[in-house]
Each structure stands twice: as structure tokens, then as C-alpha cells.
């Protein structure tokens, strides 16, 4: 059985098409207006930090084990949920002047800096292009051991639907 | 000339390692660099030592497996005392460590060829009685069990706990469940003693660098070791909670209601408590394949300990066996330490066994998740140099001809945990085997009592998450305070709150079998069930 024929929960990733069917992505015209969160958390697991940190009430969890639902109108793109998600499953995405932007949680070395060239990786871990770090922030939330929330810019806005990790190039 | 190896991690995205000051230890007379806060096993590993002991019968090289004092593969002679668990013994300047060699070692390559009866040292020469002692002396020479030091080894004073002691509430095991129980019981004014066999409290929380799931009210979003530090601090503020570390419970005598403890430096202590809590956690399971005892085949938790507690790299390129949460998380921890993960292999058929988000976060960094596969053999002579994996057909049968070699220098076995029920059994409980809970567990009542005077919580009650262990611990702390006649009017309220939280935590489809199993083994009155 090839990887494509497997179920997402067996191969460890969803394809863009599968996620679109699940309604994970906001409409394209909204993404061209503002930064919005994309939550790739589809299983019922007991967890709620995303809804707890959301200041604008955009992330709704009906029960501890229900997957989160996003109200795109209310989302202000503050990135708090990206830093808070224990499963590292929340990203921010938007399109500006024909460039795609993705905000991702990052817990590896080396330390990200503005202007760093990065290799863009998709959900399968394949290299899909190069991009640049534009806004690395270190989000503390009162936690003494926080994580980086890094925004990466890429030339192709379509890539922003695919890129979910990056590797900083030397 | 031998190159000086150093496997320590100096830069980590999450952790800062407090190693303490540099000391020198000697392995078979050779000086090695170590740090004060390292255990002997971690210090040796950091210096490139992979072989800690040899198997008793066939003298096969053995590395550590669990790194938390359970597996006995890391036993060595330390300062003249044989069979010391080096993974839970801290180094000391000038410490002399020896591998336990025997005169049979030279024959090691040939031993595998024959069946060797004399080395079944436990059963032979017991009758007639007089030959036992001389025979034992000879056999110890062959088996490498070492000999007792001729005079009492020089030891540091043990901290004043000697002889006998009585307390209201004795907690065995200072992990998330034990510590939470100590905090709750301590806050209700119960005279509590908590013991743990490691050098500090925290259990397996200390090596969890990832953020926890669950409800934000109970630790979600916090990194595991942070939660451990918080609980330790809460305990240290309670005057009525005594802590004894490096102390193991080695026996319980129901007729006298006495628990026997073994403290550091061979001190023993008898404790009479009104209520006991057994929160001893779990053992890691191993997997059967050729050469699964080779140094380099480790428990996934053992690798986590080495990596996140002591900051020592287990190798440069590893593979994981199993796709439960532990295996997936450990692969992520390896990536964080800059170690390559050559693949996560597991016979899972329909899905990865852990949470999807854990799988997704390693997959997007290019770690292959290979389901429907299993390992057949570890390669290498004295340490792991690779592995042979094979594809499985339906019903788990290997498909011939699909074997392939994966290059790696260590193999992590993350195929699940078994409850550590050894101590539980001494209370004469009713034990049952429940697969969904991880193995042998005692029947308990709604207040987590499995014997008249003993409670159970955490992984030794049922293999679950640390967050559920915390809630179970809290509940036991409250139930015990009530039973001991302490506790204010807020207790029933808190019990209700935590019980509800625990139910919510177990509300996901992942816990369906677990919920059913827990319902099956929970009875109304434990006294009646035990009759």
C-alpha cells in the first residue's frame, strides 16, 4: 500500500485537499485581508489551551475532547494559540502583496533571526522551496520555558497552504 | 591513542542542564570526566562507554535499558560494593567503578554454543545444605555477581532516619500521582511521608520537555518538568510532609502493618502507617527480536532520561519501535537535541497508536513513520550498528524478502508500559490482568482503595497520561485525609470537582476501552470483594 492510499492517521499527515474538505482553511479572500489561524487538530483528544488563551473568543471548544472550531471573523491573528498549542497543530496564514506568510511554532536549534533563509518543509517533511524569516517572537505567557513563534515569508502564496515546518539554512 | 569522547549536549532549545561542578571518576582505573549532578551511568555514557555489564549466563555485553533503576542491566561494582544500580547512583569525586568481570569472560564467544547448567545459580547446590556456601563462592566467580566487600564500605551519614518510624500516610513513589497526593493530604493536615528511590522527587515528569494536553486548570499547556518542579515546591512548603529520596520500599508485612524501607548507604527503616498509597508507576516493555540485549537497544523512556535529565546524547542516528505517544514524543525530543531519527517503525495497521498531532509534528520534520513493519534483528557485535526491519502482511506475519537494513547506532523500544505492581501484591489484593490498563492491576473501590489500608494511583493503577495521574493523586490525597479524620468542609467539593475533571479527561475515543476496563474493575466495597 502506498502512502497516498493510507489514512491520514496512519501516515502522519493530511493533504491540503483533505484539510479543505474538513473546512480547516479560511476563505482565500479573508486570508488576503488579515492574518488568520489555521487549526489542524482533527481528533478528539482532551485538551483546551487554545480556547483558554484566545483573547478574542475566536476558538470555540464545545467540550474538553471536542476538536476546536474557529470563527474567522473574530480572529485577530494574535498568535497566542500558536504558542499555546501543546500539539503544535496551530498555524497562522495570510497573503499580502502576492507573497504568502505562515506563522509556525518552533522548538529547535539554531535560534531563528530576522532575515534568515530557510528551507520550507511541507506536512510530509519534503522540501518545497525557500523562504525568509520575517518575524520571530519568543512568547512567554508566564511560562518559564516558552517557544518560538516564527513567521516565514514565501514568494508563492499557494505554498502557504502547504508549508508547516522549516529548516534554517546555514 | 583513544580520542576523548564527549556525548553531552551543551545547547538545547528548551532545557538548560545544571550539571554542577566537575569531578573525576575512575572506570577500571581509567580516569573519566563527570559532573556532580550526573548519575554514574549517565557519566559513563557521556564518556562513550556503552557496555555496563555482562549477562550472567552467556556473558553477553549489556548496556542500560530503562535508566530509572528498574532493569538491572547497568549494575556495576561501585567503591567496592558489587551490583549497584549505576543509573540511580550519583557520582562522587574519586569514585571507583569496576565492570564485574569473571574468569568465564574469555570463553564468552563459545558460551552461546552450549547449554550451561552450572550457572543457574539460584536453584543448584541447595541440598545438601553444607555444599551451598562453597559452591556459591565458586559460582559467583563464574557469574560475575561480585563478592561482598570485606569491611563495611565507608559511607556518608544517611540523614537521621534510622530504626522505626510511624506516620499517618505513607506514599511510595514520588511521581505525578504521589506528589499530588502528598500536596492534597499535606494541605489537609495529614502527617505524610513520601519516599522515592531516585535522588529527587518528580518521577518521570522530570524528562518531559513537551507541553501537556488536558485542561488548563490542571497543568495543560505546561511542560512536564515544569509541572514537576511546581509540585516539588508545593511539597517543600508543607511542614507536615516529610520527603525521603534514594529510599526504596522493599517489603510490606500485613500482619504487623509495617513497611520496610531501604535508604541510602544500606540503612533500613521500619515504617508503620495508617494508610498507604502505592504510586510506583510502571516498567517499560521490551520487544522480542534477535540481539535485543545489545548495548544500544534502549527503552524509549530510558533514552528520554539520558537526553532530557542528564543532557547526554544516546547516539547520532536512531530508530524508534512503536507508534504510541511515548515513541512519537521521544522522536521529537531526539530531533530537539539534534539527533537524526531514521524512522519510527511499528506493526500498527489502521493508524498510529498515539495522537495524530504528535505524529504530524515529527512527520513534517521528515521523520519516516513506517507502519506495518517490525524489527527482526539488531546488528552489531558489541554495540548496535544497524537494524533489520521487515514488512508485515495482515495478521502480523512478516513478508519474506521485504527485509531491509536501516543504519542506526541506537534503537529505542517504545512499545508501552506495564504497571509496577510488585509492592501492590504484598497487600494481598485481588489482581486481574486487564490489557486496556497495561497489565496486572488490583481491583479497587471508588476511593481508589485496593486493600483495607492502601490506595493506588497513577500508572501502577492504569497506564494513562501524567495529567490523569495528577488528578488521581489529588483524589487519593483527599480520600485518605477523610479516612484519617482530617479534612475541612471543602473536601467533598474538591472530590467532586476532580472526579468530574477526570471523567472529562477520559472522554476521548482514545480512552473508550480504558473507561470500560476501569468500570469493570471498580467495586462498591473493597472489603467484600477481597473476602
Image (tube, rainbow, N blue to C red):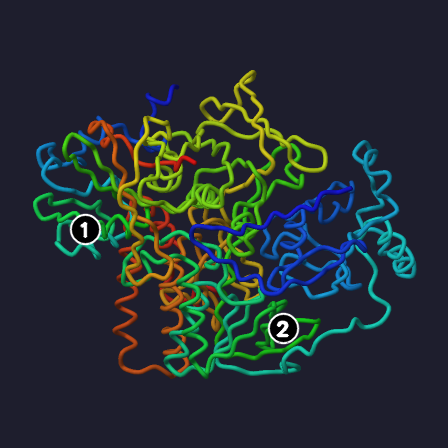
Chain of the residue displaying label 2: B
Horizontal side, residue A81 vs residue B388: left or right: left
Instruction: Using the image, tell me which numbered label, if any, was put on residue A78.
Output: 1
Q: Residues within 10 Å of mark 2 (few under 14, many from 20)?
A: some
Instruction: Using the image, tell me which numbered label, if any, was put on residue A1.
Output: none
- Measuring 31% from the left and 53% from the top, which residue is drawn there? A138
Horizontal side, residue B34 vs residue A149: left or right: right
Q: Position of residue B424 (x, y in %)?
A: 53, 63
Q: Give the answer, above or below, for where A156 lies relative to B251.
A: above
- Measuring 46% from the left and 83% from the top, which residue is drawn there? B240
Compare residues B312 and B511 and report the one nearer the observer: B312
Please tell me whether mark 2 sits on a helix, a strand or a loop: strand
- Measuring 56% from the left and 49% from the top, which residue is drawn there? B302
**Residue picked out by circle 2:** B260
Compare residues B531 and A61 and report the one nearer the observer: A61
Q: Are marks 2 and 1 on the same chain?
A: no
Compare residues B525 and B318 and report the one nearer the observer: B318
Q: Position of residue B440 (x, y in %)?
A: 51, 52
Instruction: Specify the farthest residue to the front.
Output: A115
Q: Position of residue B466 (x, y in %)?
A: 41, 57
Horizontal side, residue A82 vs residue B58: left or right: left
Please tell me whether mark 1 sits on a helix, a strand or a loop: loop
Horizontal side, residue B61 vs residue B484: left or right: right
Question: Residue B93 lies in what quarter of the image?
Answer: bottom right
Instruction: Specify the farthest residue to the top.
Output: B401
Q: Residues within 10 Å of mark 1 (few under 14, many from 20)?
A: some
- Measuring 52% from the left and 19% from the top, which residue is drawn there? B399
User: In 3D space, how far apart are the residues under numbered discs 2 and 1 (Cα atoms)?
Assistant: 56 Å
Q: Position of residue A40 (x, y in %)?
A: 25, 39
Amino acid at each position: 500500500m502506498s502512502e497516498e492510499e493510507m489514512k491520514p492517521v496512519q501516515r502522519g499527515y493530511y493533504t491540503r485537499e483533505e484539510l479543505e474538505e474538513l473546512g480547516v482553511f479560511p476563505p482565500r479572500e479573508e486570508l488576503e485581508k488579515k492574518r488568520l489561524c489555521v487549526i489542524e487538530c482533527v481528533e478528539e483528544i482532551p485538551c483546551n489551551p487554545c480556547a483558554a488563551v484566545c483573547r478574542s473568543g475566536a476558538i470555540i471548544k464545545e467540550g474538553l475532547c471536542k476538536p476546536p472550531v474557529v470563527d474567522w471573523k473574530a480572529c485577530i491573528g494574535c498568535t497566542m494559540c500558536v504558542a499555546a498549542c501543546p500539539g503544535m497543530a496551530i498555524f497562522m496564514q495570510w497573503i499580502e502583496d502576492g507573497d504568502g506568510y505562515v506563522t509556525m511554532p518552533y522548538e529547535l536549534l539554531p535560534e531563528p533571526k530576522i532575515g534568515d533563509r530557510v528551507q520550507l518543509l511541507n506536512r510530509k517533511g519534503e522540501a518545497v522551496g525557500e523562504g525568509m524569516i520575517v518575524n520571530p517572537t519568543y512568547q512567554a505567557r508566564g511560562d518559564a520555558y516558552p517557544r518560538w513563534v516564527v513567521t516565514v515569508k514565501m514568494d508563492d502564496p499557494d505554498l502557504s497552504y502547504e508549508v508547516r515546518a522549516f529548516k534554517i539554512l546555514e | 591513542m583513544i580520542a576523548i569522547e564527549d556525548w553531552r549536549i551543551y545547547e538545547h532549545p528548551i532545557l538548560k542542564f545544571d550539571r554542577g561542578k566537575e569531578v573525576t571518576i575512575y572506570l577500571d582505573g581509567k580516569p573519566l570526566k563527570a559532573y556532580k549532578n550526573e548519575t554514574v551511568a549517565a557519566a559513563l555514557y557521556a564518556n562513550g562507554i556503552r557496555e555496563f555489564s555482562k549477562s550472567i549466563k552467556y556473558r553477553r555485553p549489556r548496556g542500560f535499558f530503562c535508566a530509572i533503576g528498574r532493569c538491572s542491566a547497568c549494575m556495576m561494582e561501585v567503591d567496592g560494593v558489587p551490583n549497584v544500580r549505576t543509573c540511580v547512583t550519583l557520582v562522587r569525586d574519586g569514585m571507583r567503578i569496576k565492570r564485574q568481570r569473571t574468569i568465564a569472560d574469555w570463553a564468552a564467544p563459545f558460551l552461546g554454543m552450549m547449554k550451561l547448567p552450572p550457572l543457574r545459580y539460584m536453584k543448584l547446590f541447595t541440598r545438601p545444605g553444607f555444599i551451598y556456601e562453597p559452591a556459591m563462592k565458586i559460582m559467583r566467580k563464574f557469574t560475575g555477581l561480585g563478592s561482598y566487600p570485606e569491611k563495611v564500605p565507608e559511607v556518608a551519614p544517611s540523614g537521621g532516619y534510622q530504626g522505626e518510624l510511624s506516620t499517618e500516610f505513607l506514599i511510595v513513589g514520588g511521581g505525578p500521582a504521589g506528589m499530588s497526593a502528598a500536596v492534597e493530604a499535606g494541605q489537609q493536615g495529614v502527617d505524610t511521608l513520601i519516599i522515592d528511590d531516585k535522588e529527587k522527587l518528580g518521577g518521570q515528569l522530570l524528562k518531559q520537555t513537551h507541553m501537556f494536553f488536558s485542561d488548563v486548570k490542571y497543568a495543560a499547556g505546561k511542560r512536564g518538568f515544569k509541572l514537576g518542579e511546581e509540585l516539588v515546591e508545593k511539597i517543600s512548603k508543607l511542614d507536615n510532609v516529610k520527603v525521603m529520596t534514594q529510599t526504596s520500599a522493599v517489603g510490606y508485612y500485613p500482619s504487623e502493618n509495617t513497611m520496610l524501607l531501604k535508604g541510602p548507604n544500606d540503612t533500613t527503616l521500619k515504617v508503620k502507617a495508617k494508610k498507604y498509597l502505592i504510586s510506583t508507576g510502571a516498567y517499560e516493555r521490551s520487544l522480542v527480536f534477535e540481539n535485543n540485549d545489545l548495548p544500544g537497544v534502549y527503552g524509549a523512556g530510558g533514552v528520554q532520561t539520558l537526553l532530557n535529565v542528564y543532557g547526554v546524547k544516546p547516539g547520532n542516528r536512531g530508530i524508534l519501535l512503536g507508534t504510541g505517544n511515548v515513541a512519537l514524543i521521544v522522536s521529537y525530543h531526539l530531533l530537539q537535541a539534534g539527533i537524526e531519527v531514521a524512522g519510527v517503525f511499528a506493526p500498527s495497521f489502521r493508524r498510529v497508536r498515539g495522537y495524530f498531532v504528535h505524529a504530524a509534528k515529527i512527520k513534517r520534520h521528515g521523520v519516516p513513520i513506517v507502519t506495518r513493519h517490525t524489527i527482526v534483528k539488531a546488528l552489531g557485535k558489541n554495540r548496535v550498528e544497524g537494524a533489520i526491519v521487515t514488512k508485515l502482511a495482515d495478521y502480523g506475519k512478516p513478508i519474506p524478502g521485504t527485509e531491509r537494513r536501516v543504519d542506526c547506532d541506537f534503537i529505542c523500544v517504545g512499545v508501552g508500559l506495564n504497571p509496577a505492581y510488585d509492592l501492590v501484591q504484598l497487600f494481598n489484593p485481588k489482581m486481574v490482568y486487564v490489557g486496556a490498563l497495561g497489565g496486572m492491576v488490583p481491583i479497587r473501590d471508588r476511593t481508589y482503595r485496593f486493600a483495607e489500608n492502601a490506595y493506588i494511583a497513577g500508572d501502577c493503577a492504569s497506564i494513562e497520561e501524567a495529567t490523569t495521574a495528577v488528578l488521581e493523586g489529588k483524589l487519593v490525597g483527599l480520600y485518605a485525609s477523610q479516612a484519617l479524620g482530617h479534612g475541612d468542609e471543602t473536601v467533598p467539593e474538591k472530590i467532586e470537582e476532580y472526579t468530574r475533571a477526570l471523567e472529562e479527561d477520559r472522554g476521548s475515543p482514545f480512552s473508550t476501552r480504558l473507561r470500560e476496563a476501569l468500570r469493570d474493575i471498580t467495586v462498591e466495597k473493597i472489603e467484600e470483594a477481597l473476602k
